[in-house]
Image (tube, grey):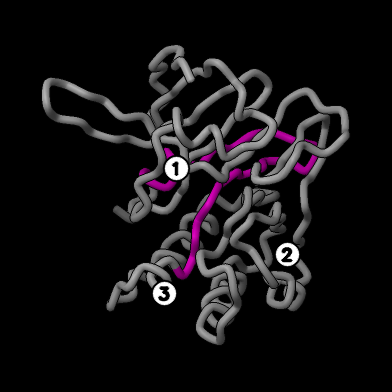
Amino acid sequence: MYSFEAFERLSMEIETSRGRTLLIADPHIGFELSRGLRIRTHFEERLAEFIVEKDPDLLVILGDLKEPIGLSFTMKRLLMGFFSDLRGIPTMITKGNHDGRIEEVAGKFPHVEVVEHALMDGLIFLHGHTNLPDVEFSEGYLGHIHPAYTFKSGGASRKTKIFFRVGRFLILPTINPFIEGFDVRQGIKMIPFLKDSREGEAFLPEGIYLGRVPL
């Protein structure tokens, strides 16, 4: 579950003017605190190890770095550990709806920047829970809805994470292996500027094209 390959399938790397840019979405660090789990998964430690091994020139986290909307002492400790484990890798967080007060911790690390959205080389990076900013761009990357697709066969069904493209936007799945995701046909309604979309294209994390999905 924590393998390098698993994290790699749920992330993507692109080239920007900042160099090799690693994109991940919705880690939800501290999800154990909100979901009643009695054990620590240490997910954020394994994720940091993956990022350090990839050694990107820039890491972009497309929002919801943390799960609890507030900022408890325990959550501060988890974030401090995560940012420290990144070992100075330049990191940009496009603030999500779960990232309340995250600046209080991120501000202690010179290599970590928190923004509402980022515009780079004509590409826009954002979480996806608010209206689209009034800027020009050619392509957008976001998270927020943890896109998944439900396969049905007979009386059985199975949900799997997907990358989902709608027009100029690519929606990344949550990189957290403990979070299943939402069927994209319902989840798309949670993105204000895409909620009226009629169809999109689905890709498995392995890169297999599933085809067009009516919404």
Q: Secondary structure at mark 1?
A: helix
- Residue at 69% across / 49% down in the picture? 57
**Eyeballing the image, is 149 above or below 4?**
above
**Eyeballing the image, is 65 above or below 214?**
below
Q: CA distance from mark 2 to mark 3?
A: 24 Å
Neighbours of disc 1 within 10 Å: few (<14), some (14-19), many (20+): some
Residue bearing mark 1: 8
Residue bearing mark 3: 33
Q: In the drawing, what numbered circle is on residue 184? A: none
Check whether the beta carbons of the residues at disc 2 and disc 3 lie within 8 A of each other.
Answer: no
Q: Position of residue 16 (x, y in %)?
A: 75, 35
Q: Write down the quadrant of residue 80 in the picture.
A: bottom right
Q: Hey, what amino acid is under mark 1?
A: Glu
Q: CA distance from mark 2 to mark 1?
A: 22 Å
**Observer-nearest residue: 207 or 15?**
207
Q: What segment is highlighted magenta in the picture?
A: 5-30
Residue bearing mark 2: 112
Q: Hey, what amino acid is under mark 2?
A: Val
